[in-house]
Structure formats: structure tokens, C-alpha cells
Image: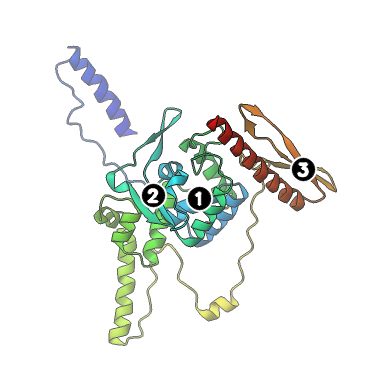
Amino acid sequence: MVRSCHTTCRTALEKAVTEGLITTNPAIGCRLPPKKAKEMQVLTQDEIRRFLIQAHEEGYYEFFLLELTTGMRRGEILGLQWKDVNLDTGELHIRRQVVKKGTQALISKPKTKSSIRTILLPPGMVEILAELNKNATCDWVFPSPVKEGEPRNPDSLYGRFQKILQRAQCKKVRFHDLRHTFATMALENGMDIKTLSAMIGHISAETTLNIYSHITDTMQRQAAVKIDREIGGTDAQMPEFTQSVEPPKASEQAQATATPKPKFEPYKGKIRKPGTGCVTMINDHLYEGRFTPRVNGKRISKNVYAKTREECEEKLAELIKTMKAEIAEMKKQAKNA
């Protein structure tokens, strides 16, 4: 707040100097309080599990899973086009990002030269993207639900992200903290700093080391204890570090006697993700599924009916798949006409 006020006052006083109202700008040389770095937070393994279950329920599973398995920036994910994804080799090319300017989403080059990179996706992520690609209707991997043929606006995800966190009973974190969560998990699972730096697009490994020094310090202390055990043959116990993101692993005996975690049931809202239709209960033994896409600027609606919600969801999914294929073919024919 103080820094913001100083910037405003300095700008106003500088204008006063320019117009000859005062001779010098008294704000120049004013000492400012040090800029506080935002505290980095990461999700625990259990929070990640609940978060992804809820994200799947709300139709955002692919987006957030890609973030948690690559550590990409939000704008980089939104800037992905299908031509950037090689579903055969698992290579993902990061060549652009989507940024917000005013109320508009603009396409620009990535943040730095090192942000232009190619990463290798886990096999499971490749399979999920391949499935998503089957229903693709435009070049963007994550298109706008309201503006046909355009990428999604970065701001449109913030509110949904916070709702998913809340409904999944996770602590409140920033979107950028998902990137920190990925980096932390990568380091704790043995990825070296240089590889991590290249994967998340940092300018240098030194930048990565500075940001995640608390994790690497913990890893060094744990390694030192392991070395002491191997070389010295001591029975020293592995210390518990408060900076560790995950709690220490329980022994086999403790795992056998531990109370199993309750199954997390996702919150089921009335509003579904655009493009997934809706299911309505007509009566005790009849459900209606409806899909209303926009075709050539006009809304068209088609329905399916079933005796159970599960059967209705299956019929609706098949209807959506068929209609999207028809719409894509119509667009292709119109383009070639």
C-alpha cells in the first residue's frame, strides 16, 4: 500500500515539476519499505487428490492436471494449440501465451526466451489429451466457451479455481502456487535443478535454486543422514523437517493399522461446464439430457431421455460427441466453399 501511494505521489509531483509549479520532486530519494515477497504455498498429496476429483466433477480436470504435471504458467496453458501437442511422442511445444489487457485476452510471445521450450509429457497426460482432442472443434486446446475460435480469457479461470479449492476442502492458494506444487514434488522425487529449470522455463538454474532453496536444503540434510547411515553404519533416525511439504511416511506396521481416509465426494453443482450439456430430473423414473450448442451464431437444442441419471449421462455424452463432429464438418465445408 505504501509503495503504491508513493508511486502515485511521485508521478503527480513529477508533473508539477514539469509544469513549473515546484522546482524539485520531494518524492525522489524517499526510502521505501522493502517489498515483501508473496509467501509460497503448495498443496499436499491429499489436497491434490481432492482438488482433481472436484475439478473432474466441474469439467476442468484436463486443464488443472496439465498444470500439476508440467508446472506451466496459466497463460502458457491457455496459449496451447493442438499443433503444439505431439500425441505420438508426447512432446509439448510452448510457443505463445495468453495475457489479459483490460477485459480482452491477447496472444503474445512467452515471458522470456527461456520460456519458449519443449517438454515431455507423462504417458498418462498424453492419453488424456488424446481423448480431449477427439472432441476438439477449433485450434485451441482450451478454447473460450463464449467466443468461438478464441482462447479462454485468463480471468475466467480465477473464480472457478477458488470454488474448486473451497469445495475440495483445500487451503486457499494462488494459481501460481500450483506451479510451485509441481516444482516441489519434482525436487522431492529426485529431479535435478537444471532439468526442473528448463522444464518450467526459468532463465537459469540459479533462479530455480533461489526460489526453491528451502526444499533443496531439506533434501541435502536428508541425504546427509542417509550417507551417515551407509558409511558410518549408525542407527541415526531420519529427522523430521518442518519445511517438508509431505508428512513423513508411516512404517509398514502403522500403514496396516491406520484408519483409511474417508472417500471424498465432490460437490455437484447445478451449473455445468459449457459444452457438456445438462441433465434434469423430470420425475422419479425419467431424466432429460439437453445439449444446446451455437451454430452459425444461432442456438440449436437436442434432447435425450433415460430412466436413470447414469444412463442419461451416457446418452448425452454420445449426443454431444455426434453433434460436435457434425458441427466440425459443417465448418470445414463452409471454409472450403
Circle 1 is placed at which residue position?
64
Q: Amino acid at mark 2?
A: His
Q: CA distance from mark 1 to mark 2?
A: 18 Å
Query: Residue 304, which numbered label?
Result: 3
Q: Which of 329 and 283 lies nearest the eye of the viewer?
A: 329
Q: Which of 268 and 147 lies nearest the eye of the viewer?
A: 147
Query: Disc 2 on helix, strand or loop?
Result: strand
Q: CA distance from mark 1 to mark 3?
A: 30 Å
Res 145 → quadrant: top right
Q: Are there few (<14), some (14-19), or many (20+) residues within 10 Å of tag 2?
A: some
Q: Are there few (<14), some (14-19), or many (20+) residues within 10 Å of tag 3?
A: some
Q: Position of residue 127 (x, y in %)?
A: 53, 57
User: Of discs 1 and 2, which sits in the foreground?
Assistant: 2
Q: Are there few (<14), some (14-19), or many (20+) residues within 10 Å of tag 1?
A: some
Report the residue at 28% width, 60% height from top. 194
Q: Image check: 280 left or right of 1?
A: right
Res 76 → quadrant: top left
Sequence order check: which comes first, mark 3 or mark 2? 2
Q: Position of residue 325 (x, y in %)?
A: 62, 42
Q: Position of residue 92 (x, y in %)?
A: 41, 52
Q: Image check: 308 left or right of 175?
A: right
Q: Position of residue 115 (x, y in %)?
A: 32, 47
Q: Are marks 1 and 2 in contact (CB under 8 Å)?
A: no
